[in-house]
Image (spheres, grey):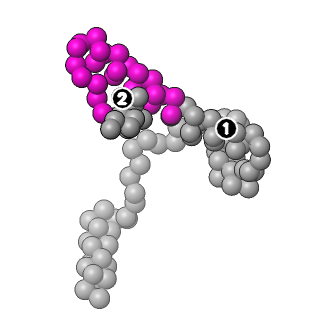
């Protein structure tokens, strides 16, 4: 209730000082032309869940980019670590998935 009274008092003070309470716009009316292709892309992004299908190509794409590519990058990283450690004369690092970490008993 107190907040409502404060708001009304502020409105009355603002309108009495200025005459009217208007919002000031700094930009103005700029001539903006809408691009048809951008508008279509924005509308399509809003309804993508209606267009998405679980089919063979989609599952293959998820498997390749979600599993195989990250695994390949990780294996290349391990290979690079092992090569640089061998070149520098350091002992091999014991990392998950590296050949040196497999069953050292």
Answer whether residue 37 is visible to the viewer in this image.
Answer: yes
- Image height of 21 relative to 54, above or below: below
* Quarter of the figure with residue 84: top left
* Rendered residue at 56%/39% (across/down): 67
Residue that numbered label 2 is attached to? 100
Count up the numbered dots: 2
Residue 99 percent across, percent down from the top left? 41, 28
* Rendered residue at 28%/11% (across/down): 87
**Viewer-closest of 42 and 61:** 61
Residue that numbered label 1 is attached to? 61
Residue 43 percent across, percent down from the top left? 68, 48
Label ID, residue 88: none
Q: Which residues are magenta?
A: 70-95
* Rendered residue at 77%/43% (across/down): 56
2 or 1: tag closer to the N-terminus: 1
- The local secondary structure at tag 2 comes to helix
Q: Main secondary structure of the magenta part?
A: helix
* Quarter of the figure with residue 97: top left
**Viewer-closest of 83 and 34:** 83
Residue 35 percent across, percent down from the top left? 66, 35
- The local secondary structure at tag 1 comes to helix
């Amino acid at each position: 209730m107190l907040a409502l009274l404060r708001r009304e008092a502020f409105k009355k003070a603002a309108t009495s000082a200025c005459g009217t309470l208007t919002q000031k716009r700094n930009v103005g009316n700029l001539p903006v032309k809408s691009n048809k292709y951008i508008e279509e892309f924005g509308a399509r992004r809003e309804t993508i869940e209606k267009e998405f299908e679980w089919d063979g190509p989609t599952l293959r794409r998820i498997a390749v980019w979600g599993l195989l590519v990250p695994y390949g990058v990780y294996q290349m990283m391990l290979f690079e670590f092992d090569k640089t450690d061998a070149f520098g004369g350091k002992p091999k690092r014991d990392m998950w998935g590296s050949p040196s970490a497999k069953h050292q008993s």
